[in-house]
Amino acid sequence: MSPAEIAGTILGLIGVALMVRRNAWGWPVGLVQVVISAWVFLDAKLYSDVLLQGFFFAIQAYGWWHWRTGAVVAGGLPVTRIGGTALAKWAAAGGAATLVWGEVMRRGTDAALPHWDAFILVFSILSQWLQARKRLENWAGWMAVNAVATVVYWARDLRGFALLYLLFLAMAVWGHVAWRRALEETASG
């Protein structure tokens, strides 16, 4: 395991733990983590993951701004839901985008595991956007992404990141439970 993979792993754990706790400091920690991760994924020829880190950088900055602005304006940005119909549309669009992007990567690059890597890219984008908007359903998306990523990274001999994403899977369950409680407290209070 490289020093960059170790640093990315540690920062990833810290960042997600802060997200579970709905702490806005998770966003700047995430900014540093995605820069390091992009380098690791480039070396492993997981090009969709490299692109994903660029998106993560932008959405991390947006999420930090949105959470801080929402906290000032409304006394704290609440956890909300998107609803079943919208969720089904997001999932269908994500499935279609995964197929298309995976095929582009398969035909146009020497990408390793292009369709699985595309799934990680597309559903991470969707989940990260939902997280930035503080929607409960982000955690279900992260559970799926983390399960797939664990296997992909292990297959590409990125053992540290594979273990990190296995921990992220457990943290996504923890995050879902914690955010669901916060949603219920807001609804009852």
Image: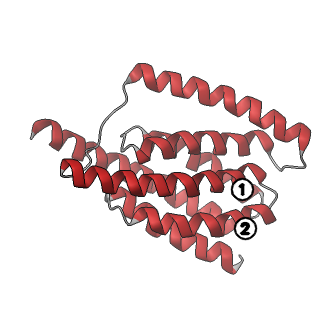
**How many numbered circles are shown?**
2
Image: 149 above or below 35 = above
Please tell me which residue lies in front, 149 or 41: 41
Question: Splitting the image into 4 quarters, where does residue 42 fall?
Answer: bottom right
- Residue at the image point whose x is 31% and y is 59% from the top: 21
Amino acid carrying mark 2 in the image: Trp
Side of 106 where 65 appears, left or right: left
Q: Which residue is mark 1?
A: 50
Q: Secondary structure at mark 1?
A: helix
Image: 96 above or below 163 = above
Give residue 184's position: percent from left, percent from top.
Answer: 19, 39
Which residue is the extreme one toward the top? 85
Give residue 157's position: percent from left, percent from top.
Answer: 76, 64
Give residue 89's position: percent from left, percent from top.
Answer: 52, 22
Q: Which residue is mark 2?
A: 39
Would residue 6 be visible to someone looking at this image?
Answer: yes
Amino acid carrying mark 1 in the image: Val
Give residue 125's position: percent from left, percent from top.
Answer: 57, 43
Image: 127 above or below 34 = above
Please tell me which residue lies in front, 9 or 94: 94
- Residue at the image point whose x is 23% and y is 41% from the top: 183
Side of 19 where 107 appears, left or right: right
